């Protein structure tokens, strides 16, 4: 976005106009967190926060009305128009590639499942929210260049306990899940084509500031890459009488720094992102880079070059955090800026102590008929945990819940919300509250049967399989150990990273699953129709004959060819002569009456005929025959 | 085809079509259209004709007009015409060769899925890159890519798509916006896009918002056969459907001119049935021929570009936004000795002379640019003198509204 | 004789109980040939679970039994879980006994008929006449077939609700043969309520009752009792289910056949590969096809309503939307009642071979498709088509044999026209 300015005079006038005319307050902050993880990876988390406070926005938030934006400044207009039009109050969209390994890496700043995930809280409105949701996903798919338009009623749910609003909300609103829609597309992939429009939503576009570090190459070679948009109404200040609109654009990465030959895990900004950081964004209020040195007492593990401008420390024990802060406004003076971390020792690949809760989900069973989804919850802490487990299963996997919800299992869990799937209309929504005891692993299984779909419902690569979206586990951990953020009240990343003591809410996602459904033969529609209709016709034909025709005796016309007649004549002559010789009673083939049925049993019949002929002769002899009835009367009881 | 001259020879009138300068391209004359076009004027003039090939040159006579669209030999002409005949071009359009468009659009479609069809994605991204470089903005490019190659797990260099084994150019680039991707690339979506019959909630970036002043470049690549193009290995679009879609566009005045390029096997069959005017069609191979790919990249493991597009891209890389290269030169971009298949061209629906049409009229964009010679001194960015961000006149102190609070994230009532 | 009868019942029960308690029981319960979405016991248990949790049972796509069945099953599962297998076996034994009773009454009726019409018969029809020995052996065969036919045994072991459907059908046949018109109407209502297709049994029943009683009340009474019973059942179901939603999940499901799980019928693969805009047309065609033979056959076979009922049951078993082998076993058990037609049947060998080979190949092809991944759906579909063809051949052969037997009874067995050889043709 190169705005071509006119003469310097015009520029000043324009600036003056800007200062005077605009009442609303737009603030933009850009922050980057670099955190070395215990497993040797490096986690980078970019957060670009744009806040917009104005009396109209505050009033709209108080009254649960739609936003009406005027005079866009730093807030992206493309997103603002979508938000305005579709009654959006809170929006969370993430596009992720890779799996966040909670067991090794703890809990991230923003947790996102593989694929696309979208959940939106709408304002109370008289419009049909399902239609609004459909229109919203279409608009977002155009905005972010992802196939979000595949979100429809077959993968949308409104969970009861999970995904509560993260913005300011009263209890009557937050408790009403009908205002909320959640959907996930596990098959969506994220690539530069999603990064490009995302970058263009930022005030400084892709030109200057921390966003200039986002060169696609290293981003997509990462082990984990997550792009997200979070829009929420937040408190403007501590006493929260006014609300502001906060848009957080976050990008999370987990990379493995190229280690040197000796195994030192040295990393630098330049090696990580391959692009120089030269300019900071002039529109940013705050532009900072944080390096997490919580584990790095007195810079013993690694040293940072250049030295940080500031070191912030807070908390104690589980909530102890220490950040090395670089202010890029001060640091970037026109030359490429890089932070180098030099390790004093090589990295030891050892046991990483797991966090308090980690979850694993997988499919069991074999074949394409059935199977079951099994999820394992591991609580490594000393206190029991109550967690909410949300599972959204597509309709073509028919769940049988009675096998896993026996009376004894239901003692330590209950199903908070269950929406049974309807074929081709609704997915399964399973939300259960479970308790996992201290230092135990608990398993939950959901048995399913796989359905056969109509041939047009299969995607072009049907044998790849179908994805089941990631399940969500929400819980309140007793301490902030391994937790990155645990407060909704902060507006900057730094504020969020310096966690407070006490209970921490954490929401984690499991793996997505891949199931293969039985496939029909896609090349067979005409054949199948013909064959099945043939079988139907096979019944129709004979029944038609039986019901519309009657048995009639017709004269048999024995048509013989000349040759056959000749042969028969010769045979006849031969036979007649042999008959005289043998004296047998063989009948010539030609003279035998041809019987319709060629049933071998009918040989008996012929004998019977002979017997009957004899009987007839006998009958004819004595005229008053009562024999048949006599015989009958004998056989009767 | 265009009729240039009419002559009276051997008691009949001969007409010759203009030369096309394509070289080895063969002509497929749609005889039905010719006969239909001929019938009406001929009946008014009371003439009979036979269709043959062969021509002679002669200066055209003036007076009475006759509409002819093919090479014909007029057997006899009984006319009430006082003087010799003159020629009127098809559909009464003017003969001007100046550009008549006001905006440019591009629709670039890759219809193949799966990793081994990497080259089709590279094809379409090469075109995308050229078209963008020459000035068409993303908002006026509809890019349809059926599968993700750049971030495919099998790609050894993620976020890149190369069209050259020496990896000269990353055609995927850093600034790419794919409008239809993955399973969205279907025949139905493509035809709806062209004809404009989209659902009301379709976003702007997925709509072809052309008008009657738009020049559209339509580039399609994938696997094709005689009369069809395969979409994602599960459905097909036939040449009749495509022709009808273009006719719908014409009727709804959705284009000024279309340059239709198709790089598949037996590609020429796809433009056989076109019957709408102002379409120039280029196919990488004729019916019965296969389009071949150019070379394989052993590091990636698949063929990475097709021949026609490779040479087309080579040509386009040398085109700049103010270049004077013509379409006729573009039509010569892949002669048989490099392309192995014969490039097919259909010019009969296109009234202008390709040697007078600039390549940038389709690949570039109409831009209203004002040139200035004044030198501007811009302040240095990122320095001590920052752009003054609007420090606002703060909001009035709010009335006593009740304080807001955040909702509880896990509202469990302990059972 | 009685000792033999008791023997086969005990043996039948023993086989079923043994199989139920072995590992084969679980395996058979999962086979799609026996358990369809309509009769699978697992789905009944799922429905009962959802009902107990207060979740609307009929808004989903899993449970398709009627509300009364839901109520009864929830009682059975909660209180009688230990005795469930015994219940299924007992129902099967009762069905066998009822079918034997049907055969006995039918035989008696046929003999009486025969005596009445003896003068209509031709002179040389003597060997074709029914004898009480042959009819009594027929009765024994009926119950033996039902008790030992692998189809019915496996259907009972799989604990499908077809066992209960068969029981009700057997009672329908008993009431039809014995002439209890009101009971007949009520029982047909129950059978229709459970699986919809037995409504076609109204026609043979009414024919039989009218022929017996020879009054118009024999026509009105069963119809009236059918209508009233069905209405009562529907109202009770609406009360139990809370709304009329259950109609779509039960009868709507049977008629629209949305679940394309493989089974031995013709619907599943046909509608998997169907083009969307023809779906409704073919659905209507196939459903009408299941009922289209009622009228013509009832006109043709009006003299033998039980044969008509058997033929209709057979066609229903082939052409219904979710057939199972339990339905097949039921009408196969009735076939021995017409032992006397066996000499006239021409295709017994072919039909027998087809039955055996398709019954063996079917599960193999299914396994290859679903578990091994080496075959595809076409193999299994072809085998089910062959199986259905075999069934159709069996029934049409039987009907042809009946027609010929009837003819030869009245016209004699000599196939001659004026002394020269002739032949019988359908014209």
Image: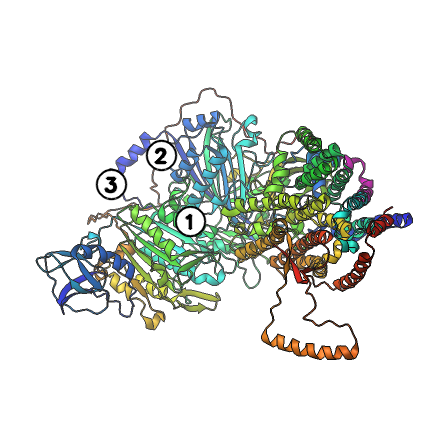
Q: Which residues are magenta?
A: C74-100
Q: Is residue B268 above or below residue A52?
A: below
- State the CA–CA distance, disc 2 to disc 3: 18 Å
- State the CA–CA distance, disc 1 to disc 2: 45 Å
- Chain hosting mark 2: B
Q: Is residue C48 visible?
A: no
- Chain hosting mark 1: B
| Label 2 element class | loop
| Label 1 element class | helix
In the rendered image, residue C82 lying in the magenta stretch gets the answer yes
Return the residue found at the far right. C3
* Left or right of B46 in this view: A580: right
Residue A59 locus on image (x, y percent): 44, 25
Question: What mark, if any, has residue A318 been given in the picture?
Answer: none
Q: Are marks 2 and 3 on the same chain?
A: no
- Chain hosting mark 3: A
The image quarter in which residue C413 lies: bottom right
The image quarter in which residue A415 lies: top right
Dot 2 crowding, Cα within 10 Å, few <14, some 14–19, many 20+: many
Return the residue found at the far left. B82
Q: Which numbered disc flags the more N-terminal residue, 1 or 2? A: 1
Q: Nearer the viewer, residue A127 or C160?
A: C160
Return the residue found at the far top. B400
Q: What secondary structure is the magenta-colored segment mainly? A: helix
- State the CA–CA distance, disc 1 to disc 3: 49 Å
Residue C223 locus on image (x, y percent): 68, 33
Q: Residue at x 59, y 31 (%)?
A: B408
- In this figure, which residue is indicated by the disc labeled 1? B189
Between label 1 and label 2, give the one nearer the viewer: 1
- In this figure, which residue is indicated by the disc labeled 3? A8
- In this figure, which residue is indicated by the disc labeled 2? B390
């Amino acid at each position: 976005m190169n705005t071509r300015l006119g003469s310097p005079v015009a520029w000043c006038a324009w600036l003056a106009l800007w200062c005077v005319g605009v009442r609303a307050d737009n603030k933009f902050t850009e922050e980057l967190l670099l955190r070395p993880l215990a497993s040797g990876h490096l986690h980078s988390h970019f957060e670009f926060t744009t806040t917009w406070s104005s009396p109209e926005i505050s009033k709209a938030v108080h009254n649960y009305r739609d936003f009406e934006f005027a005079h866009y400044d730093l807030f992206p207009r493309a997103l603002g128009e979508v938000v305005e039009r579709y009654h959006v109050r809170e929006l969370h969209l993430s596009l992720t590639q890779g799996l966040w390994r909670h067991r090794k890496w703890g809990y991230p700043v923003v947790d996102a499942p593989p694929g696309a995930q979208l959940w939106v809280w709408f304002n109370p409105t008289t419009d049909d929210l399902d239609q609004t949701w459909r229109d919203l996903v279409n608009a977002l798919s155009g905005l972010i260049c992802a196939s979000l338009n595949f979100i429809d009623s077959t993968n949308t749910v409104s969970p009861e306990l999970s995904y509560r609003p993260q913005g300011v909300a009263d209890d009557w609103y937050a408790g009403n899940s009908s205002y909320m829609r959640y959907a996930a597309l596990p098959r969506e992939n994220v690539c530069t084509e999603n990064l490009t429009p995302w970058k263009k939503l930022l005030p400084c576009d892709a030109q200057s500031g921390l966003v200039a570090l986002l060169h696609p190459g290293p981003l997509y070679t990462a082990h984990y890459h997550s792009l997200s948009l979070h829009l929420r109404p937040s408190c403007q200040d501590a006493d929260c009488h006014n609300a502001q609109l906060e848009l957080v654009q976050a990008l999370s990465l987990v990379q493995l720094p190229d280690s040197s030959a000796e195994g030192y895990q040295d990393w630098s900004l330049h090696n990580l992102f391959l692009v120089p950081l030269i300019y900071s964004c002039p529109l940013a209020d705050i532009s900072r880079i944080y390096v997490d040195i919580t584990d790095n007492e007195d810079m013993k593990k690694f040293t940072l070059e250049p030295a940080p401008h500031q070191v912030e420390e807070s908390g104690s024990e589980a909530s102890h955090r220490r950040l090395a802060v670089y202010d890029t406004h001060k640091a970037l003076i026109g030359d490429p800026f890089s932070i180098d971390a030099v390790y004093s020792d090589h990295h030891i690949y050892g046991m990483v102590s797991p966090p308090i809760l980690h979850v694993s989900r997988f499919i069991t069973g074999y074949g394409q008929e059935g199977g079951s989804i099994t999820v394992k919850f591991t609580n490594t802490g000393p206190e029991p945990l109550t967690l909410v487990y949300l599972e959204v299963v597509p309709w073509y996997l028919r769940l049988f819940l009675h096998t896993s919800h026996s009376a004894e299992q239901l003692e330590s869990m209950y199903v908070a919300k269950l929406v049974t799937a309807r074929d081709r209309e609704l997915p399964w929504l399973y939300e259960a509250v479970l308790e996992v005891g201290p230092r135990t692993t608990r398993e939950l299984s959901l048995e399913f049967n796989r359905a056969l779909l109509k041939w047009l419902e299969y995607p072009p690569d049907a044998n790849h399989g179908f994805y089941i979206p990631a399940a969500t586990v929400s819980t309140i951990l007793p301490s902030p150990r391994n937790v990155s953020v645990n407060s909704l009240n902060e507006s900057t990343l730094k504020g969020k990273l310096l966690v407070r003591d006490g209970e921490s809410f954490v929401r984690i996602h499991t793996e997505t699953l891949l199931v293969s459904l039985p496939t029909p033969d896609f090349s067979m529609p005409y054949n199948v129709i013909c064959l099945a209709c043939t079988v139907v016709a096979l019944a129709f034909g004979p029944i038609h004959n039986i019901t519309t025709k009657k048995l009639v005796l017709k004269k048999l016309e024995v048509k013989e060819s000349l040759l056959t007649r000749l042969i028969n004549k010769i045979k006849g002559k031969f036979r007649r002569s042999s008959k005289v010789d043998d004296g047998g009673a063989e009948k010539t083939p030609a003279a035998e009456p041809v019987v319709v049925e060629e049933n071998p049993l009918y040989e008996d019949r012929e004998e019977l005929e002979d017997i009957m002929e004899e009987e007839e002769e006998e009958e004819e002899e004595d005229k008053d025959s009562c024999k048949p009835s006599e015989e009958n009367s004998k056989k009767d009881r | 085809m265009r009729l240039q001259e009419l002559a009276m020879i051997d008691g009949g009138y001969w007409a010759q079509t203009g030369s096309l300068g394509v070289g080895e391209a063969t002509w497929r004359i749609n005889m039905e259209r010719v006969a239909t076009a001929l019938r009406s004027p001929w009946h008014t003039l009371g003439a009979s004709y036979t269709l043959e090939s062969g021509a002679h040159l002669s200066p055209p006579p003036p007076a009475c007009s006759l509409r002819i669209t093919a090479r014909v030999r007029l057997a006899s002409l009984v006319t009430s015409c006082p003087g010799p005949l003159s020629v009127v071009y098809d559909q009464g359009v003017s003969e001007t060769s100046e550009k008549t468009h006001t905006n440019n659009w591009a629709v670039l479609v890759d219809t193949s899925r799966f990793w081994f069809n990497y080259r089709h994605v590279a094809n379409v991204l090469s075109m995308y890159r050229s078209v963008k470089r020459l000035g068409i903005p993303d908002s006026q490019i509809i890019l349809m890519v059926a599968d993700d190659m750049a971030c495919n797990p099998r790609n050894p260099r993620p976020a890149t798509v190369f069209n050259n084994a020496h990896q000269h150019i990353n055609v995927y680039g850093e600034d790419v916006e794919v409008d239809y991707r993955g399973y969205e690339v279907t025949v139905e979506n493509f035809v709806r896009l062209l004809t404009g019959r989209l659902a009301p909630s379709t976003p702007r970036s997925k709509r072809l918002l052309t008008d009657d002043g738009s020049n559209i470049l339509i580039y399609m690549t994938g696997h094709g056969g005689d009369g069809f193009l395969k979409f994602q290995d599960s459905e097909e679009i036939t040449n009749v459907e495509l022709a009808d879609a273009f006719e719908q566009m014409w009727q709804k005045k959705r284009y000024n001119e279309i340059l239709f390029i198709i790089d598949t096997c037996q590609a020429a069959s796809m433009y056989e049935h076109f019957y709408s005017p102002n379409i120039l069609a280029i196919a990488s191979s004729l019916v019965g021929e296969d389009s071949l790919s150019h070379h394989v990249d052993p590091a990636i493991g698949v063929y990475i570009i097709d021949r026609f597009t490779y040479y087309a891209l080579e040509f386009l890389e040398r085109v700049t936004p103010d270049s004077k290269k013509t379409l006729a030169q573009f039509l010569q971009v892949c002669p048989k000795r490099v392309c192995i298949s014969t490039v097919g061209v259909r010019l009969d629906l296109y009234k202008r002379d390709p040697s007078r049409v600039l390549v940038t009229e389709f690949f570039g964009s109409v831009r209203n640019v004002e040139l200035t010679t004044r030198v501007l001194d811009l302040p240095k960015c990122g320095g001590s003198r920052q752009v003054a961000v609007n420090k606002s006149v703060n909001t009035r102190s709010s009335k006593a509204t009740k304080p807001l609070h955040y909702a509880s994230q896990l509202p469990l009532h302990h059972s | 004789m009685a000792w033999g009868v008791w023997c086969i019942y005990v043996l039948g029960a023993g086989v079923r109980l043994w199989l139920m308690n072995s590992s084969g029981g679980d395996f058979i319960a999962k086979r799609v040939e026996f358990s369809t979405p309509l009769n699978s016991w697992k789905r009944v248990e799922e429905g009962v679970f959802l009902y107990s949790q207060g979740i609307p049972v009929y808004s989903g796509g899993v449970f398709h039994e009627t509300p009364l069945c839901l109520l009864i099953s929830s009682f059975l599962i909660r209180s009688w879980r230990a005795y469930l297998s015994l219940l299924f076996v007992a129902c099967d034994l009762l069905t066998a006994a009822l079918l034997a009773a049907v055969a006995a009454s039918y035989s008696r009726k046929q003999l009486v008929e025969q005596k009445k019409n003896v003068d209509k018969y031709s002179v040389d029809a003597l060997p074709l006449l029914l004898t009480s020995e042959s009819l009594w052996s027929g009765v024994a065969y009926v119950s033996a077939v039902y008790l030992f036919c692998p189809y019915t045994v496996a259907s009972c072991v799989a604990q499908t609700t077809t066992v209960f459907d068969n029981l009700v059908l057997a009672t329908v046949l008993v009431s039809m043969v014995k002439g209890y018109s009101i009971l007949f109407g009520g029982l047909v209502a129950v059978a229709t309520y459970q699986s919809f297709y037995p409504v076609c049994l109204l026609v043979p029943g009414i024919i039989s009752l009218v022929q017996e009683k020879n009054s118009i009340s024999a026509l009105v009474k069963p119809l009236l009792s059918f209508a009233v019973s069905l209405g009562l059942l529907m109202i009770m179901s609406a009360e139990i289910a809370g709304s009329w939603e259950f109609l779509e999940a039960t009868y709507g499901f049977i008629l629209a056949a949305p679940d394309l799980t493989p089974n031995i019928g013709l619907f599943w693969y046909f509608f998997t590969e169907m083009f969307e805009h023809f779906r409704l047309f073919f659905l209507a065609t196939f459903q009408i096809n299941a009922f289209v033979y009622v009228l013509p056959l009832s006109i043709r076979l009006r003299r033998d309503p039980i044969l008509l009922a058997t033929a209709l049951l057979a066609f229903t078993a082939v052409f219904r939307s979710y057939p199972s082998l339990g339905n097949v076993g039921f009408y196969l058990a009735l076939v021995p009642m017409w032992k006397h037609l066996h000499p006239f049947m021409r295709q017994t060998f072919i039909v027998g071979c087809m039955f055996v080979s398709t019954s063996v190949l079917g599960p193999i092809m299914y396994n290859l498709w679903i578990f091994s991944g080496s075959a595809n759906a076409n193999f299994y579909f072809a085998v089910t088509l062959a199986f259905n063809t075999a069934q159709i051949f069996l029934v049409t052969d039987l009907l042809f044999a009946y027609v010929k037997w009837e003819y030869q009874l009245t016209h004699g067995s000599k196939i001659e026209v004026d002394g020269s050889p002739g032949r019988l043709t359908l014209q």
